[in-house]
Image (cartoon, rainbow, N blue to C red):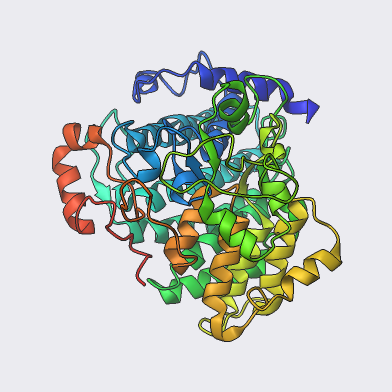
Amino acid sequence: MKKYLITFITACLFISCADDDKYERLNQDPKNPTEASEEFLFTSATVSLGDFMASPNVNINVFRFISQYLTATTYVDEPNYDLINRNVPQSQWSEIYRDVLLDLDDAKAYINENSDLSQGEKDARLGQIEVLQVYAWQVLVDTFGDIPYTEALQAETITLPAYDDAGSIYVNLIERLQNARTLLSSGQGFVGADVVYGGDMSKWNKFNNSLQLRLAMRISDSNSSLSQSAAEDAASNGVFIGNQDNAIIVYQSSPPNTNPLWEDLVQSGRSDYVAANTIVDIMNDLDDPRRMYYFDENLGAGVYEGGIYGSQNPYSSSTHMGESFLDPTHPGILLDFAEVSFHLATATSPDLNYAVFGDAPTHYENGITASMNYAGIDDQVVIDDYLSQPDVSYNSTNSNALIGTQFWIAMYDNPLEGWSVWRKYDEPTLNLPGSTGNPVPLRYNYPINEQNLNEANYNAASQAIGGDSQQTRLFWDVN
């Protein structure tokens, strides 16, 4: 960690000073960098992506609300899915396009112009960038649906990019990951600038394949042939096999290098969030031992009472997030072994029966066990007792509900995936928010800036997806 700490700190400072103008850097010549290098931009983009995924700030993203892991004490617009008031869609759109994808694109240009690197080193670095870019593109697609893709990031020549079909984007993203596999095997990539694996290329290869598995399994209902071939390809080339492979951002103990959770739960001095009764009630019913990690025992030993989702809730009499989440060094999760295991459980379930290694019951139990272990629960007797419960024990006739519920519980600290799990499996049953009763969103509305500044392409995209509504299903959400 020490060997890339300086780069990491510098990158975080770069992020904190970033201009809000989405196109500022497009006036700079990428072939003659004056303020950045590929290492600098790679770290910056990685941390920007990790910060966005981890943040509970309602001005940035509300995935922890939509997945009903958290709810609010006072300000309940966002838990009731009013995302326009704070322009949440615009915040995500700008953050991912500007601070992740554009930075990574600039880094690619610098790498290709760097005569000090061998071709193998260039290819390996480009492979690492491809993995992160595919990840970022999927975040945008899984939030909005159709988005600017082939014409994006080209503001010098295309100021009003057209939107691409989301399903076609997924096809291309899978191809990019398959090509990145070769790049990652070509040489040594980023080391000191790599705040995920510190330059361990074997783990980057597993990350690449595990991300491909995620994409493949997401489209099992909408493009079954590609789903099967891509999932089998990913599994055969090596996915995560334990928590030691997890793709995580390691944070530091002092600003500006801290986990965004700490910034909003501790540093802010505010008391805006409590655990939602949705997840607390489900875990209480299952006597889930992860409650001691997910939640604080501020109401007494073994007492967990979530706030009513979407209503105002007294902070003092509602369960808070667990102590680990108040630690500034709490890791940020991009993708983990638990997620991979649940994807494999679905792939090997009777409904799909893909030719990947292992069997559904084993993968299902691996997912729960990995989540337990990550939460600090290593007592196998405790884990086995949980796995043997009638409402937990794997049953092929009820595999969708079992996998969906346990997958959702395990994604507590990776909330975008939690939302995607609910949309994909339709499990578990989420609550309607207490103040309005509004339905749970299936996507974000497009940003207001797109409606005003890219009107023709916005209108075409809205028509193509069936209307720019929170209740318009994404292409892979067909059931």
Quarter-wise, where is residue 197 in the image? top right
Instruction: Find residue 416 and report its horizontal and vertical position in percent.
Output: 49, 49
Instruction: Note whether 145 is above or below 80 in the view shown.
Output: below
Name the image quarter holding residue 92: top left
Give the tally of numbered discs: 0
Instruction: Using the rendered image of the protein, determine whether residue 453 is visible from the camera's viewpoint.
Output: yes
For the C terminus, the quadrant is: bottom left
In the rendered view, does 397 fall on the left or right side of 153? Answer: right
Residue 339, percent from left and from top:
62, 60
What is the quadrant of residue 365 in the picture? bottom right
The residue located at (48%, 67%) in the rendering is 427
Question: What residue do we see at 34% from left, 52% from top?
Answer: 443
Above or below for 34 versus 121: above
- Using residue 444 as the reference point, say whether residue 418 is left or right of it: right
Position in image of residue 20 (x %, y %): 38, 21
Measured as percent of width and height from the top left, residue 332 is found at 63, 40
Whether residue 358 is visible = no
Q: What quarter of the picture does the N terminus occupy? A: top right
Q: Which of 86/70 is in front?
A: 70
Q: Which residue lies furthest to the top in this view?
A: 34
312 vs 90, left or right, is right
The vertical placement of 215 against 266, above or below, is: below
Residue appearing at x 74%, y 69% in the figure: 386
